[in-house]
Image: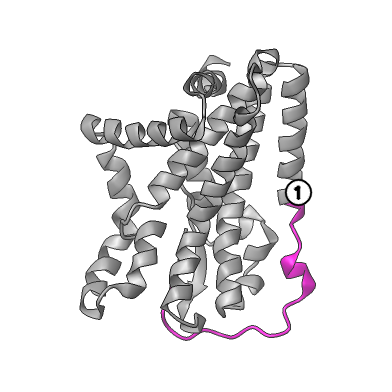
Amino acid sequence: MAFGSRGRGNLVLGVPREAFRPSGLFLSILALFVVSGVMLWTRFGSLKLDVILFVISGWVISLCLHEYAHALTAYRAGDLGVAQRGYLTLNPMKYTHPLLSIVLPLVFVILGGFGLPGGAVWIDHHYIRNKVHDTLISLAGPATNVFLALVTIAPFWFVNDPLGHLEFYAALAFLAFLQLTASVLNLFPIPGVDGGNALRPWIPYEWRRGFDFIAPWGMLAFILLLFNPVLNNAFFGLVYAIGDGLGLPRDLSAIGGDLFRFLSL
């Protein structure tokens, strides 16, 4: 998720190369994802613990890539300050709100298997060249989730019998399901959510004050609305319909979710 100031900031010149290198923390999380995936594939150690490590590390990687996509698009659109702020290092601790970007989405995954999009990177919109670039910055994050959803679903297009590595494919299917929920939620035209923020540059000026007033609470309000059974069924019905259309096996994602639940460790 991206947010920022519409006022004037400081243009950053001579950005060091280190600002574009993946951080050691991100590379460590990536290594954990690969190792836990190999452990799942070979059924080494505690399978439930392997699933937990695989899903958590995979989800954190996707959160980092989501924010990186916002920042990289903003950098190319004119806000060089995102490099100085560390957003292009993929370091989750560099985000403006690590609690919103990493901790809160992880809590939602742990408690309910729900892919809550993270936030946020701070964008100085004064340097963004035009409305189209402004919209592309907001859409870059959800586009990353859509891409990752397709990447995690793609293996199921070619695997006829996943039972030989059931736990691995179940964890992968659950991770794909999380990407789908994040993609759908992120693209809703709600103030404060990427889908709504993508529309903001095109909203008449006299309406923007109301939009900006609602924006800090837009995501929270939407999450609270999902506690309504009718809206909850409609939302997840849409997610499942998209998953079915893309070839994501519902049964495997459900098994992966069951294996992931912490309370039955």
Q: Looking at the image, which is closer to me, 179 or 100?
A: 179
> Was residue 40 drawn as part of the magenta stretch in this picture?
no
Residue 176 location, quadrant: top right
Q: Amino acid at mark 1?
A: Leu
Q: Is residue 246 above or below residue 21?
A: above
Tell how many labels: 1
For residue 12: magenta? Answer: yes
Label 1 SS: helix
**238 relative to 167 in the view: left or right:** left
| Magenta-colored segment: predominant secondary structure | loop
Q: Is 129 or 14 nearer to us in this picture?
A: 129
Q: Residue at x 22, y 32 (%)?
A: 230
- Image location of residue 35, percent across then percent down: 77, 32
Q: Is residue 220 left or right of residue 207?
A: right
Residue at 47% across, 23% down: 250
Indicate the quadrant containing the C terminus: top left, top right, bottom left or bottom right: top right
* Region in magenta: 4-25
- Across and down, in percent, residue 244 comes to 45, 30
* Mark 1 Cα shell of 10 Å, populated few (<14), some (14-19), many (≥20): some
Q: Is residue 116 visible?
A: no
Name the residue tied to disc 1: 27
Please give the name of the residue rendered at 69% of the width and 17% of the height, measured from the top-left corner. Answer: 165
Which color scheme did the rendering employ for the protein? one colour
Residue 142 place in picture, x, y as percent: 48, 53
Residue pictured at 38% horizontal, 64% vertical: 197
Residue 86 drawn above or below residue 105 = below
Please state the horizontal and vertical placement of residue 1, each as a whole percent of the image: 47, 58
Q: Quadrant of residue 184?
A: top left
Residue 255 in view in this figure:
yes
